[in-house]
Amino acid sequence: MAKAWQRPFVNVFRHCRVGEWRRCSREGDVAAVTDKSLRCAVYRIRDAPSAGGYIQLPGTSMQSLGLTGHYLYVLFRPLPGKHFIIQLDVATKDGQVVRMSFSNLFKEFKSTATWLQFPLICGAGAATKGGTRVGASDARWTCLQLDLRNILLVYVNRRYGHLKSVKLCASLLVKSLYTSDLCFDPTLTVAEAQRARLRVTPVPREMAFPVPEDESWYDHYVHIRFPSDSSEASPGPVQESRSPPEADFLGRVPRLLPHPGASSSAAQDGAPSAGPIAPCQAPSVPRPLPEVSLFCEPSEVPTGSEPSAPAHARHKHAAGNGDDVSAPKPTVEPAVRGDVAVHKPFGGKQSKQEVALAKHPFQKRSFLPDPILRLKGVVGFGGHSTKWALWTKDGSAVVYPCHAVVVVLRTDTREQRCLLGHTDKVSALALDGDNVLLASAQARPSSMLRLWDFGTGACLSLFRSPAHTLCSLSFSRGGALLCGVGKDRQGRTVVVAWGTAQVGRGGEPVLLAKTHTGVDIQAFEVAFFDETRMASCGQGSVRLWRLRGGQLRSCPVDLGEHRVLELTDLAFGPAHDGHMLYVCGRSGHILEIDHQHMAVRHARRLLPVWTPGSPVSQKQTFGSGPGISISSLSTSQATCAVGSEDGYLRLWPLDFSSVLLEAEHEGPVTWVRVSPDGLRVLSATSLGHLGFLDVPSREYRVLVRSHTAPVLALATECSHGQLATVSQDHTVRVWDLATLQQLHDLRSPEEAPCTVAFHPTRPALFCGFSSGAVRSFSLESAEVLAAHRCHQGPVTGLAASPDGSLLFSSCSSGTLAQYHCAATQCRVLRVAANVVCRDAHPTPNALVLSGDSHLLAFVGPSKYVVTVMNAASLEEPAGCARQPLTALPQLLRVDVRALDLASARLASAVALCFGPGPPGHLLVSTSSSTVVVLDSTSGRVVRELPAVHSGACPSLALSRDARFLLTAADRAIKLWDYPTQACPGCQVYIGHSEPVRAVAFAPDQQRLLSVGDAIFLWDILGPLERSPPGSAGDSPGAPPTCEASPDARQLEDVVSGAHGLPRQQVPKPSQASPLQLGVCAGLLRDDDGAFSWSDEEGPSEESHIPEGLRQGSSLPVLVKEASGAGDGVWGSPGDPRGLSMHPHPHGWPSAQGTRKAQVCPSARPDCYKHFVARYKTSSLPKSASVSRGSAERLLLKAVMGYNGNGRANVVWKPDTGFFAYTSGCLVVVEDLHSGAQQHWLGHPEEISTLALSHDAQVLASASGCGSTASCCQIRIWNVPGGSCRQLISYHSTAVQALAFSPDDELLVTLGDYGDRTLALWSMATCELLSATCLPEPVHGVAFNPWDAGELACVGQCAVTLWLLRGPNASLQGRREPLPEELGAGELTSLCYGAAPLLYCGSNAGQVCVWDTSASRCFLAWEADDGEIGVLLCSGTRLVSGSNTRRLRLWAVGAVPELRCKDSRARSSSVFMERELTLDGAVVSAVFHDTMDMGVVGTTAGTLWYVSWVEGSSTRLISGHRSKVNEVVFSPSASHWATCSDDGSVRVWSLASMELLIQFQSCLCLAWSPASCARPEQQQVAAGYSDGTLRVFSISRIAMELKMHPHRAALTAIAYSADGQTILSGDKDGLVAVSRPRTGMTFRVLSDHRGALISTVQSRSKEHGDFGAQWGDLWLAASSDQRISVWAANWPQGHCELVDWLSSPSPTLMEGPSQPPSSLVAFCPWDGSLLVCAGLGVRPEVVFYSLHQKQVVERIPLPFFAVSLSLSPGARLVAVGFAGGGAGVGDPRPSACLDAAPCHLPTERVLRLVDCESGTMQDFAGHDDLVQLCRFAPSARLLFSAAHSEILVWEVAGPWAAGGASGSGPLLG
């Protein structure tokens, strides 16, 4: 990018002062003369070239012009009959100098890597001398326009840097030279262009040639543009200019003269061959131009016909041949490409040479835009070292290296700016004090340094350091001096100083001094107060340096007794401290050195803190030695930040009297830097973490987490936009693609992960390890779901089918395994040996599946063979010949060696990739650098891409629409124009410092990923995704796409049949919707601000946020009014620029299904405000809660918890006291005084949002769309009666928001990002009035409380205001974008204030205020650090809630005055009154009109009562946010406890259902029995995933004991009958017996080894001896359907087996519907019975007699049970189902079950079975499967849990507390 002084152009002669000859030089006959035609002074060079006459700019070759303009304009006239040469030296971005020579002396084009020779013909009548052309006799003044950037790009494949020098050799006349970034038209002046209103850039006045009146410019002058058809220099304006007479044009204007014999190395390498450069032809009278060369697919042209050019192609190439190459961005290195169109000369005939060139084009097709990729962000930190993270001057951004990339990261928005250019890891960084220059050094080769313009990101200079390696850089404060420290090739320490004052002005850095030293230097810094003074420290030395007289001299500081210390870092102190020098060391010492007296003033040492009486320290250090090893320190005006290897960042005052703040990290701290304002401290760790400590708020924020070793593989997930990576650092990490933040970190110290894959439909992750294990992880609970060891070697491939049913894995020993992964528990189906290639390396492309999940492809059984199989059966489909294989039948085998017979080496397959189908293509990358496209059914070679990379391509990917092919090899990635059959174009991108291991397209297909040393995320700048050939989107009936999209009128005619043809059927009433959008349709904004639709997407520009808006201050700032806002009118129906909603016909039933217009699929927005339903594995019950008798035995008493996953799902009317919220699929109405609840049932799915009418008489609730319904349910409830008044439905996925109009006559409903519709309903009739499809996801909607005819929506970067028009309530919308000052982002919340104000919150934490009457945003301020999801306003107060857990109260009384432009009110009048921090992100809030009190809901599942007067928050409702694992009760039935995956154990009061105590999380619980101690000494035993067992005291609220009886996670726990013994079972099948008094484990039983222990229960032996003599009876059940019963005497240590039960036929359960673990319990009403579920092949409950040793009773179930509980009072059994079993009343034989296992859906009901009468009832109320049910000891209450939701049921009837003999009425 040119500097400001070089804009708009530079007169090179004036810049170099030609005439004074000081900055330039001349030789020979050079004189200034006056030209009569130009009427000005020019310079004449008259000697022959051999005589040495020339003008050279600048004067010597050691100087440089430094001109960065893309175009060079040479105004010259050749002397008649003479030769001339124009010689240019151009510097490239990488420092290479390329010489270009243009002359009429040359016969042909020639080139080398550093030299280009172009023949230049300047006259049609050129004479010849000895076969050499000379200047024409009528040579005229010529404007030679050279596009230097494209010349370098096309011919030498390099990026243009700047113009270094120019040499003009005889014989010619020259007026001047000019450089510019603009493409001027020399035929027009500024005045002419303004008069004609032409969209061209006219030539400036001093560059213009005078033209007589009424004459053409072409009559007197010549314009030569090279390249002639650049994308930035379009010939369009030339064609529209005035043309000369045709005869004169044909006779005098030069034409292109091809040279058939021209050949060079550049042409052989693929660069375009160049003929002589011809002037641009002036446009003549329009006439058809015969096209000779067109690049068409053979299939597109009929046989024997000539291809015809499209209209735009003729126009584009009408001015001659040229290379259409657009300018590369600084971040890419595109490959050479050029489209050559050879045209037939005017009046001439086509030559044989031209015909041959047309038939055999050697150029690659055009591939636009160029560049098509832009690096959006990188995930990683460090690379060479975890140091060098720097603050910017204003403290708003951090600069740090990520391997070969320098990243500038804004700390508030997390936006990245990447500086590319280094080819190896960056070893040092330095930024000057004014943030003008940034210096970076790379490790190899030989420490190349780059100087960057920090503001623009342009590389100003590239030079080599005298040191072989550089490890430190430091700028002076003003940026005029740069110092570096490194090692030379002999290992000696080198200190180098450069002068950089002229770098920003076109100059180069100057080496000022270099010196060698024998001391060690670990840190080096230039003093900020004196740029001639420096300091260094190292092993046993501190030296002070000075630059004087071109020499660097140093003097050591006398350290005395500290001279043996290893010093690591230093920093100069502030001025008031005398600029004291602070030095730290690994021994914990901090030395204060007076640099003026060169003496140590103070020496301090940091030691670990020791607790009196404790043998070990509280803080263990990572390093050795008694002191805390300090690795870095940094100072501010008042503090000193210290980073040490014990993982702590400590902030001290400068006197080191006490620690002010400290932050603990996960690893050793390697780098600290204090921000310039001293309010933030940046820290980095050796584990690749980068973050900062905010001193005022005392909060630590992590900016970057990264892998510490190369990344091996990646996988992407579609629904939530997640990325999983596997690295050599033994970690598997999951990232959010939207924010690039880490979500999960799975570590495996013992075995290395190799491959990874997401489950397509469930939140699960599969990973293959070096040990051969394949494990599945739950992303919700962060636990291992299953582990399989089918392989003997490292897992090399892992792939899940797109439909989510199958998983495949392969290993280096040649084994292929197939798994069934549709259920949560993945299981093995088949294992085959010797199928996959042995000794293969792990790669993401080893196993691939087709998009329809039908085909599986892999390399094997040898590396030369590619095998394709049927994925489901691993055998051939019908119609394919079977070929025998050792282990498995195959579909297809392709020998790769036969594909390249001409190669001297045998080609082997490296990577595979399926293309989108149809057609079904398989792409194979071979070791011979070729990509072969095969037909996946026949094996036929469809096409071949040779020489894709210089080496083998280990990874490749094809976009979903088959437009782009992505390949990777070594450190580069290539993006190919895949649809082009012949010589497809490609672009090459660099940035990785290590080989790229894997590439992939992001789920949205608008980004791509490459991993190696780090994770790179690239934006695709091309058009949006289009449907692949043959897909639905490519069919005739599909919506129009970008290629051919009819306008609105044509589309309307197609829909309505308006082409003069009669309609075939009577039209029915249907929804009137806006235009159907094609796949590429985008939303554009006209000048009037209204909506308009376009099928083209223009280039997007990044929005830059002003510095003032990004400061940490919460003071508002006034925003400049958006241009043009409010000038337009509201759209009317039928207006193509207005988005309108038309009314529906009256009388149309609202419950009737409607067909909506199809819109583009949208990815989930990057904001937490948007509702996303929790993933569920269950389906809806087929029958609701219907009793078979006359009465229901269970009554829903209470609901525990609030659904924090909902949005705006709490309502409160303080005047009437009505209070309601949601939990799962229930609406809970609660009395805040008594706590009594009402429960409104009816929704089948999770409720997303609520809305209460203003009179509090009507409540609207919305739930998502389930598997059995096509639309979401919206229920209208009558509040006084609690009944559902109406059920309406329209939205297809989920409802995001509901809102009532101020008069309660209308209800507006907003769909989520998958639905994107807005619907308006009449509350009087509950009919749908109007609906529209929205162009983008919308996050909130609200009615104007002051005008029922206006409502507003907020979404992506805009506010949409809607007006109701007419009696039919048609809506007309107007979209108002955010002002540029606010930047780009999402508006996530809104609320109306005093008329006409609208407050909107954004995901960047800003609140902006809109004047709805003027449609403008006039005020904005930083209200929070995170996304604002809730806004409420009443009077002069505003409440904001965000995902940072903060709730803030703002005083906004002055905002109405700020709306007036002439107001004297200040923006500082808006201030924050109060702030509260809650336990989660704020998702719901409702406040009193006075805003003094309210109720707030958070994602933690808590409802808070907030009082601003008291400044307090009180918990109203509390529940778990994750899955509940266990519910246990105290023996006295006064308390109950729960444990959950959310990290908590909670103890509740059974009477009031209030939360009393909370402990840390566990997996299983047990309450001590009443016999163990007094009631006040009750205990709770908890089992944990690390194998530990903890005992908590309820009365003391503290942990009493911790034991470690297991190595694996505990899954079941129980107390013995006397409470003196604890039985615990783990996931490996071991049962441990421990004594809590001693903390010892005295027995371990391994009878169930290999299967998870699901149940452990103990009781006293009261009924018979069962063949045993001991007093305690206990049982254990495992997941493999085995149950053991034991008798024990624990005080004496005796235990013996009483009985053993197992499944009668376990081999019959190999089908996909394998039942869950066995459930078993002692029967409370008959101690001799065991009640079992899941013990067999049928879903049933069996009663097993311990006396008779047999089953005495069976109760059939419709599905297998996942939960079981028996009432201690009546003979009642509660069951929760999992599905997959045989149905009731249809017991099938075992053979049938084995042949075709049924797939019944999971029911979400709780079944209650009366074992005495045999009756049963099902009860609905949960929105997921009931995974847990427990009867209370009193038998009056039953607790059931589905995920995090807990329902408390009251057992009704006399049998609730009756004994075993109690009976009740028969219920059927």
Image: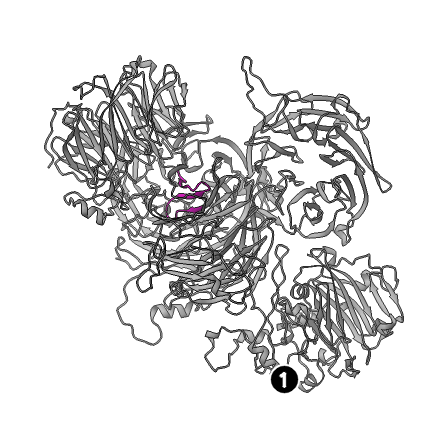
Instruction: Specify the color scheme.
Output: one colour
Question: Viewed as shown, does residue 61 lie left or right of 113?
Answer: right
Say how many tags the image has: 1
Choose between 1670 and 168: the one closer to the eye: 1670
Quadrant in which the C terminus appears: top left
Position above or below: 1721 against 1144: above
Q: Quadrant of residue 41?
A: bottom right
Residue where numbered disc 1 is placed: 346
Question: Viewed as shown, does residue 1699 lie left or right of 908?
Answer: left
Q: Is residue 179 visible?
A: yes
Going by the numbered disc 1, the residue's amino acid type is Phe
**Disc 1 element:** loop
Q: Is residue 1370 visible?
A: no
Is residue 531 inside the magenta stretch? Answer: no
User: Magenta region: which residues?
Assistant: 756-781
User: x and y percent of residue 1003 in the render?
Assistant: 45, 52
User: x and y percent of residue 1501 in the render?
Assistant: 38, 34
